[in-house]
């Protein structure tokens, strides 16, 4: 009872199965009225309904976030260093050298996590002042195609009368809470009668109500028991191959750090044993060489900590975020027709887009438009369609003016009253779940759950069988100008197992008839095949459907209806019982004919597939269509050619053999696959091929495939938003995939690899200089650089220049990326960053550190100023060494930059300017007098940097550092040029190739003849559960939604049009090993 809280609280949730929750209800129940103000009356459930989806609150944010961050190895390591620095006997660096970078990194990460959680909590935190799981409302969700939620007829009769609702008394019994979004089992008992409650009577939390002005509902589940919350498990994050490699490298760096510290500790022990005894008289406790070596080990762990990149993870996240914005802002991936921009729904996978080897694509709605046109049909063994000029339907006042058909003979036999032809179109006008809307007299609009149904009902409409309206108990059709109303007795709805739907109607003459349409393989099992045109239609790439009917005995029908009611209200095994009844009555059918609906390719699909193939990306098409339809689409997409040999695999249990054979094929098309099998194919390739995979689709049947792949791409098309919501990236057209991979993906991968190589180079060079200095300071753990330089090196002096490189750099522009798809291949082979590349980077750092330490050391040894005074002191040497280091790594950054922008210039020269400004400030008299212990380098900058030999030393070290790099790159371009070198025209040998050769279009490909086959096959009509039960329970109206203004005024980009992308093959000789 709605107002009896004590009674409601007496009911507890049960964890058993079967009949569970019993609610004695005197509640506002279930009615729908259209075009008034939307109102929801919602009530509390049996216990606290608060929902919390955020990770933090104001009290737990700081401790929980810090706990999560210190689970990262690098952060935990620096916390350990901070503890070591609190020990005076160990620490040779002040506390701020570790605290400042650690706090900055933690703060930036904390701000990002807090912002993300705040956005999440704003949109999904509800304290059930809002109902979460209602029974029952009328709505159409955010899907493009119609999805209807309808109340029971018995409750809909209550209308909007609050008095009637207050007197309503019923009992709802339903299943326990679960995470099945597509299934609900329950019953409503009212006045001794039991009514079935299923998923079509339920409104889930999160869907959007449209065309509904007000409604009443009963809350069934609340709080964490709602299906939405039941599905909110722990999110599984996808990791890129670079992420996995970085984890291995960081562990290796830790091991390398321990080895360096151990070497220096052993050196300290030896030095203390041999030389330390000479200073024993000056030490209060004498010399203990082993203990000194032990303390020195930990001191060097602190000093050499820069080899472990604490700021690496934050920098990587910033780079990924920036590259994600580029995708979101790309106008060339914006689809103005639907006002749909591209969207990067994740920021962690951008560089993985540059390493794709396998693409798994759905067909319908992904490669094709999913806009169906009725092209051909076969009736009583005779084929119609595409034979003559366009048919004139002016004789039919209710015809759809947009409908086109090309066979006047079909119109003639319809108008002549041919019984078989009229029965054919009568079936199309009756057997469906389409909802009509008639704003003006004669202006009909059909809202269908699938484009196929809309095309078939529209065809019947134009040939004189116009579906006008429906009620829960009837269907009204205008047959050749005569209004006829059929009593609707049952709807045997479609699902993935049945692959067919049927309706049972009673004509005005009292005749009972079952009309059925479905996949030909399913229909033919229930009759003797007599139609020979299905295979011909499928060979032309058309989507085929078989139509059949059956007359039913009235006495049998009465008995069947009683058994149907019992099965429909059963709490256990309801679906199985209904399927058995459907199977019983759908036997002995008589074939009427078949339909052929065309689904045209999207613009630019053949050119996109050709471009991706030239990039050595394997494209597999996974579809539920029959073999002939899929093959023809393959020819249309340029995936199949006549010279190819066909290999067919039909075995279920030979996974390895299937994969081995498929990988040897140039093109792979998987037919008749279910959504689960799509995901299994993706998992099979991931398991055995060690390659990066991408799955792209547009419908709910593609979700499992999208989630299974390394990267999932959703297309916002005719099938709704399920694929988009489950994807990592989304856009409106398949052709945008080539720009996502060949431009954004390749750039992201290249930028990330350059960043990692440079980041490790500068950090290892910085650390190695400390290592060499240990051999000249008695292994005393003294630092070679100023303490403030150590603190600011990664945070200020080198942070912004490397970020600008990682956000703006391009080896070639987007136009050349399309002209030469082979530029994509190095990413697939991990050529830009790998363990091998990391080793070469470390060796390069070792060489640079030797130059940066020993050249300044030799230059300063026994050196005097112009006035004869000595400048051979530790502080002058530290200043010279750190200045040489910063200049050398800045020059290396310039050599790595291919695309200079104003931001690159500003950050590079600005960082150097900041460095000199900082040292002159910190080494001034004023800073020394203010904080003597923190700024001991008084006057060092002005005394050293005014000497010519100091600047000549900087020039010499810079030249020696970059000379091997320049020489190697020159020889590589000259002798082993890569594709990138050739396209950029960097090598003199290949400069004329890029500047003088004209890019000629490829030889036009001969139009392939559409192939036919003698194999019999069928087409699965839809991949989603139908809505047949709903059409028997209420009235439906739909308002045409208002379109929002376009985001951009410009038209679609020329790149996205259907013109082919011309390319030119470039041969490539064997390349030498990677080096800096």
Image (tube, grey):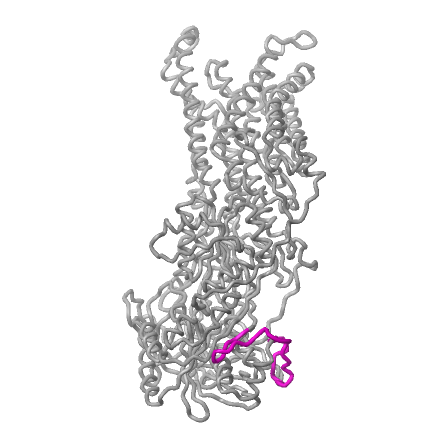
Q: Main secondary structure of the magenta part?
A: loop
Q: Nearer the viewer, residue 51 or 305?
A: 305
In the displayed orientation, state which residue is furthest to the bottom: 509
| Above-or-below relation of 324 to 1040 | above
Q: Is residue 750 magenta?
A: no
Q: Does residue 736 sit above or below 146 in this rendering?
A: above
Q: Is residue 391 magenta?
A: yes
- Which image quadrant for residue 163? bottom left
Residue 913 image offset from top left, x and y in percent: 67, 29
Residue 795's place in the image compared with 723, above or below, is above
The part of the image, by quadrant, that contains residue 226 is bottom left
Question: Observer-nearest residue: 99 or 649?
Answer: 649
Q: Which quadrant: the C terminus?
A: top right
Please give the name of the residue rendered at 68% of the width and 15% of the height, measured from the top-left corner: 947
Q: Quadrant of the N terminus?
A: bottom left
Part of the protein shown in magenta: 376-405
- On the rendered structure, is 947 left or right of 167? right
Report x, y in % for residue 232: 41, 58
Q: Is residue 319 left or right of residue 53?
A: right
Q: Position of residue 186 (x, y in %)?
A: 35, 74
Residue 421 visible in the displayed image = yes
Occupied quadrant, residue 526: bottom left
Instruction: Count the labels in the image.
Output: 0
Q: Nearer the viewer, residue 554 or 1033?
A: 554
* Residue at the image point whose x is 47% and y is 88% from the top: 486
Q: Find residue 646 and report its horizontal and vertical position in percent.
A: 46, 55
């Amino acid at each position: 009872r709605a107002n009896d809280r004590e009674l409601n609280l007496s009911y507890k949730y049960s964890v058993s199965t079967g009949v569970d929750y019993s609610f004695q209800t005197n509640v506002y129940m279930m009615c729908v009225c259209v075009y008034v103000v939307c109102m929801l009356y919602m009530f509390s459930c049996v216990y606290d309904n608060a929902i919390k989806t955020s990770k933090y609150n104001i009290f737990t944010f700081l401790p929980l976030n810090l706990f999560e961050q210190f689970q990262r190895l690098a952060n935990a390591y620096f916390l350990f260093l901070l503890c070591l620095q609190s020990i005076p006997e160990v620490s040779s660096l002040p506390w701020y050298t570790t605290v400042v970078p650690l706090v900055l990194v933690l703060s930036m990460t904390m701000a990002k996590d807090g912002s993300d959680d705040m956005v999440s909590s704003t949109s999904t935190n509800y304290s059930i002042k809002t109902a979460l799981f209602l029974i029952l409302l009328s709505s159409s969700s955010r899907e493009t195609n119609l999805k209807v939620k309808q109340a029971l007829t018995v409750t809909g009769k209550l209308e909007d009368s609050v008095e009637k609702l207050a007197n309503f008394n019923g009992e709802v019994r339903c299943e326990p809470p679960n995470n099945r979004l597509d299934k609900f089992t329950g019953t409503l008992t009212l006045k001794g009668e039991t009514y079935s409650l299923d998923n079509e009577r339920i409104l889930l939390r999160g869907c959007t109500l449209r065309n509904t002005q007000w409604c009443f509902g009963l809350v069934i589940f609340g709080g964490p028991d709602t299906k939405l919350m039941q599905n909110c498990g722990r999110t599984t994050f996808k990791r890129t191959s670079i992420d996995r490699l970085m984890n291995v490298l960081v562990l290796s760096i830790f091991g390398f750090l321990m080895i360096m510290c151990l070497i220096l500790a052993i050196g300290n022990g030896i030095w203390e044993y041999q030389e330390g005894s000479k200073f024993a008289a000056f030490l209060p406790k004498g010399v203990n060489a082993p203990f000194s070596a032990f303390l020195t080990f930990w001191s060097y762990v602190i000093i050499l900590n820069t080899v472990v990149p604490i700021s690496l993870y934050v920098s990587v996240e910033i780079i990924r975020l920036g590259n994600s914005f580029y995708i979101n802002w790309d106008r060339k991936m914006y689809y103005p027709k639907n006002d749909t921009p591209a969207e990067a729904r994740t920021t962690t996978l951008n560089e993985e887009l540059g390493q794709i080897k396998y693409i798994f694509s759905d067909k319908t709605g992904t490669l094709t438009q999913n806009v169906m046109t009725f092209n051909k049909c076969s009736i009583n063994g005779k084929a119609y369609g595409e034979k003559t000029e366009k048919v004139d339907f002016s004789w039919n006042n209710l015809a759809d003016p947009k409908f086109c058909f090309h066979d006047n003979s079909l119109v003639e036999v319809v108008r002549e009253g041919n019984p078989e032809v009229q029965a054919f179109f009568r079936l199309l006008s009756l057997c469906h779940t389409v909802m009509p809307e008639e704003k003006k007299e004669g202006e009909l609009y059909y809202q269908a759950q699938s484009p196929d149904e809309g095309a078939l009902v529209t065809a019947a409409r134009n040939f004189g069988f116009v579906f006008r309206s429906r009620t829960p108990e009837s269907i009204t059709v205008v047959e050749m100008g005569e209004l006829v109303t059929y009593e609707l007795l049952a709807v045997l709805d479609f699902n993935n197992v049945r692959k067919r739907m049927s309706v049972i109607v009673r004509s005005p003459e009292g005749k009972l008839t079952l009309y059925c349409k479905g996949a030909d393989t399913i229909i033919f099992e229930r009759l003797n095949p007599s139609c020979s045109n299905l295979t011909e239609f499928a060979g032309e790439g058309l989507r085929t459907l078989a139509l059949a009917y059956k007359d039913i005995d009235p006495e049998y029908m009465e008995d069947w209806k009683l058994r149907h009611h019992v099965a429909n209200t059963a709490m256990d095994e309801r679906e199985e019982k209904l399927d058995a009844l459907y199977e019983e009555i759908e036997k002995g059918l008589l074939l009427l004919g078949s339909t052929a609906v065309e689904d045209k390719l999207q613009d630019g699909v053949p050119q996109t597939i050709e471009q991706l193939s030239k990039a050595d990306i394997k494209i597999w098409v996974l579809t539920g269509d029959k073999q002939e339809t899929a093959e023809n689409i393959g020819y249309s997409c340029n995936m199949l050619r006549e010279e190819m040999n066909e290999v067919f695999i039909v075995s279920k249990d030979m996974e390895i053999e299937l994969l081995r054979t498929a990988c040897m094929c140039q093109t792979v098309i998987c037919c008749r696959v279910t959504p689960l099998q799509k995901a299994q194919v993706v998992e099979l390739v991931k398991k055995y091929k060690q390659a990066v995979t991408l799955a792209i689709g547009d419908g709910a049947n593609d979700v499992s495939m999208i989630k299974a792949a390394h990267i999932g791409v959703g297309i916002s098309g005719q099938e709704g938003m399920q694929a988009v919501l489950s994807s990592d990236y989304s856009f409106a057209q398949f052709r945008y995939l080539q720009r996502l991979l060949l431009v954004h993906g390749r750039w992201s991968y290249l930028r990330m690899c350059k960043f990692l190589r440079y980041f490790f180079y500068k950090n290892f060079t910085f650390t190695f200089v400390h290592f060499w200095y240990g051999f000249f300071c008695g292994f005393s753990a003294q630092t070679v650089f100023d303490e403030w330089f150590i603190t600011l090196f990664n945070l200020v002096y080198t942070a912004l220049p490397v970020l600008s490189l990682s956000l703006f750099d391009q080896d070639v522009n987007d136009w050349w990326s399309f002209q030469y798809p082979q530029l994509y291949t190095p990413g697939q082979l991990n050529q830009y960053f790998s363990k091998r590349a990391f080793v070469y980077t470390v060796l390069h750092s070792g060489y640079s550190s030797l130059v940066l330490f020993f050249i300044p050391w030799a230059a300063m040894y026994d050196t005097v100023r112009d006035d004869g005074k000595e400048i051979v002191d530790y502080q002058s040497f530290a200043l010279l060494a750190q200045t040489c280091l910063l200049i050398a790594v800045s020059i290396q950054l310039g050599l790595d930059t291919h695309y200079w922008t104003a931001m690159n210039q500003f950050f590079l020269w600005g960082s150097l300017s900041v460095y000199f400004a900082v040292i002159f400030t910190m080494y001034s008299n004023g800073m020394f007098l203010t904080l003597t212990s923190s700024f001991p380098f008084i006057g060092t900058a002005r005394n050293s940097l005014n000497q010519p030999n100091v600047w000549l030393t900087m020039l010499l070290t810079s030249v020696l550092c970059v000379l091997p790099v320049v020489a190697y790159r020159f020889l590589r371009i000259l002798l082993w040029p890569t594709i990138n070198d050739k396209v950029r025209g960097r090598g003199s040998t290949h400069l004329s190739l890029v500047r003088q050769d004209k890019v000629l279009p490829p030889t036009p490909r001969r139009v392939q003849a559409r192939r036919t086959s003698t194999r019999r096959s069928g087409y699965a009509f839809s991949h989603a559960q139908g809505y047949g039960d709903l059409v028997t329970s209420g009235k439906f109206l739909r308002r045409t939604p208002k379109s929002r203004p376009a985001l951009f005024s410009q038209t679609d980009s020329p790149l996205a049009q259907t013109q082919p992308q011309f390319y030119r093959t470039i041969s490539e000789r064997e390349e030498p090993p990677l080096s800096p």
